[in-house]
Image: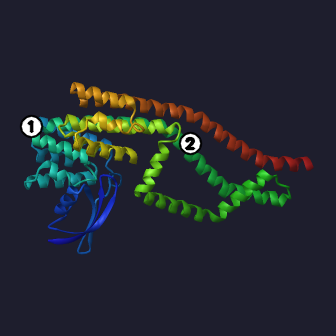
Amino acid sequence: MTNYTFTAKSFKGAIKSGNIEARSERELAEILRKEDYILISATEKGKRRFFLPIGLRGISIGQKLMLTRNLRVMVASGVSLPRALQTLSQQSKNKNLKKALERIKEDILSGESFSKSIEKHPHLFSELYCSMIRVGEETGSLDRSLQVLSQYLERSHQVRSKIKSALMYPIVVVTAMIIIGIVMMIKVVPQLKEAFINMGVDLPKTTQAIMGIGEFLAKNWAFLFFGLFLAGLALAFLRKKEGFRRQKDKIFLKTPFIKEFVRKMNTAYASRTLSSLISGGVSIVEALKISSNSVGNFLFQKSLLSVSDSIKKGKKLSEAVNNFSELYSPVFVQMIQVGEETGRTSEILSQLADFLEEEITNTAQNLSSIIEPILLLIVGSVIAFFAISIIQPIYSMMQSM
């Protein structure tokens, strides 16, 4: 037995660290998983191994979708799992994905199940993914589970791509405006100030304000960027704190124009995940726990966990969800009731997710079309303010000549 110092993260986002004795990191990960924690890092004899999140490993949802699609086709064609994983590993251009697939293949050849093998790679395979694979193995319908996962990943990829493309223009414009503004303040404005001083021009209040800001940024730009860096670190630290996340997400759910978008987006993610898990054979209690990780809002996460506990006590899904009317719309509750009465809960949730995802993309596109003219007005106003502040003293000087 080896004594490990570990850091783990729960499905609710809580961080846990301590010491546990285990035969291997694999056994340590299994022990923590039974407590609803995922191993992040482990130390043994001064050696430290990090299980980095998906973003740092460079595995995109598109890559995961292609992997799942190809694996489903090969499994459905009768290709053995080790051979399929070997082929996909050779085809992969991502080094981290290639190594993960090779390790999974070796674990399967040594006698482990596919689901147990992929659980060792939480940076690549989510709890939803592992649960679907486990159910597929138990029921002998792995190709069906992979098909459901492919559909889930494809739909998620489509929605995220549409939202990103709709919001890309405003983000690029704002970023460019900030960068150009900072460069002008640091490089151009101090030179203009020196020129005005040499000419002995009386500067208006607006020009003096711009010159003062430009001089301050020119002298303290390093401290400015260092301060922004520290603010980013502080924000990253606070995001892990439950109290901060709760208050932040409460504000989002109370902010006009944003609250409906947040509600629809989290409801859509929960509906899509629940539909995929239920159709794949996962129990409703377990599906709700896993679905809590698919939503980004802390209050929605807590609500799904509470609904799961209520169902354990004998309540219906619709009754449990109805207790959170501030989060879920009456239509959502009614659709679940229809699904319970007809025995088509998974299908109804899928249709509801389709409807909500369409509304989300339309809202994002409409928001983008509203933001564009507002941004143009802001950019135009800023440029006009700069122009007037710079031209006014020059005009005054010309009049006095």
Q: Residues within 10 Å of mark 1 (few under 14, many from 20)?
A: few
Q: Is residue 124 visible?
A: yes
Q: Is residue 137 left or right of residue 325?
A: left
Residue name at image x 31 percent, y 63 percent = 16
Q: Check if mark 1's residue and mark 2's residue have beta carbons within 8 Å.
A: no
- Between 210 and 132, the one lying in front of the other is 132
- The mark nearer the N terminus, 1 or 2, is 1
Residue at mark 2:
173
Q: Is residue 253 left or right of residue 180?
A: left
Identify the residue at image location x=56%, y=32%: 370
Q: Label 1 sits on what residue type? A: Gly
Q: Measured from the top left, where is residue 137 in percent x and y?
A: 12, 43
Classify the position of the N terminus by image quarter.
bottom left
Q: Position of residue 40 (x, y in %)?
A: 29, 60
Q: Amino acid at mark 2?
A: Val
Nearer to us in this view, 117 or 276: 276
Q: Which residue is mark 1?
A: 78
